[in-house]
Amino acid sequence: MTPEQTQHTDAEQVLEFRLGDERYCVSIDAVVEIVDMGSVTPVPNAPSHVEGIIDLRGTTTSIIDPKVGLDVDGDLGDRVVIFDPAIFDDERSIGWAVDRVEEVAEIGDSPVDDAPIDGDYIRGLIRRESGFVVWIDPRHLDDVLNATEGAAISVGQQ
């Protein structure tokens, strides 16, 4: 194991998805569900990463474009990964618009390398035969996006 390589977490599962041509993942423990993109209502003066809100079975859910924070080109994805509100400090209902959901995968046998940049929002790089999967921490990416765009709008609170 090289100094840049970290130990993998035993039996941890991740949800792998695509943003543009790249593969990303988040811990499956943070995900509540995956839904098709419905009608998004824009929010005036929202930060650039906030596409708007949707009504998800009576809960106002903010739709975030993670491509903005990860500097990925492309249109807004048509699938939404809904996160557990408990992972966010203010317990907002948040969903990420992604291009395609790939699979739920176990990390067990895959080595996880350290992130090549500073920042808590990248947990590591998972090695696969087809290349790397960037493991994102949604709470920390949300913190970074909100810090760079100013205060978070508080839509989606119940």
Image (cartoon, helix red, strand yellow):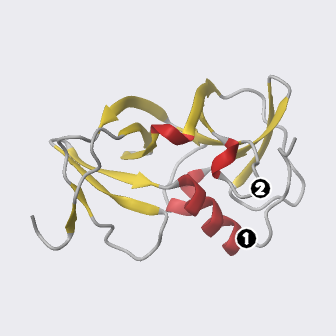
Residue kind at label 1, given as amino acid type: Glu
Q: Is residue 104 above or below residue 66?
A: above
**Residue 77's quadrant in the figure?**
top right
Answer left or right for 134 relative to 35: left
> Which residue is label 2 attached to?
90
Crowding at mark 2 (Cα within 10 Å: few <14, some 14-19, many 20+): few
The answer to whether any part of residue 78 appears in the image is no
Horizontal and vertical percent for residue 139?
59, 57
User: Alpha-carbon distance for marks 2 and 1?
Assistant: 17 Å
Residue at image position (53%, 48%) is 74
Residue at image position (37%, 74%) is 117
**Mark 2: secondary structure:** loop
Horizontal and vertical percent for residue 12?
34, 41
| Image mark for residue 102 | none
Horizontal and vertical percent for residue 66?
57, 52
Question: Dots 2 and 1: beta carbons under 8 Å?
Answer: no
Answer left or right for 17 relative to 98: left
Depth check, front residue: 149 or 106: 106
**Residue 82's quadrant in the figure?**
top right
**Residue 7's quadrant in the figure?**
bottom left
Answer left or right for 155 relative to 103: right
Residue at image position (55%, 36%) is 31
**Mark 1: secondary structure:** helix
Q: Is residue 146 above or below residue 110?
A: below
Crowding at mark 1 (Cα within 10 Å: few <14, some 14-19, many 20+): few
The answer to whether any part of residue 119 appears in the image is yes
Residue kind at label 2, given as amino acid type: Asp
| Image mark for residue 149 | 1
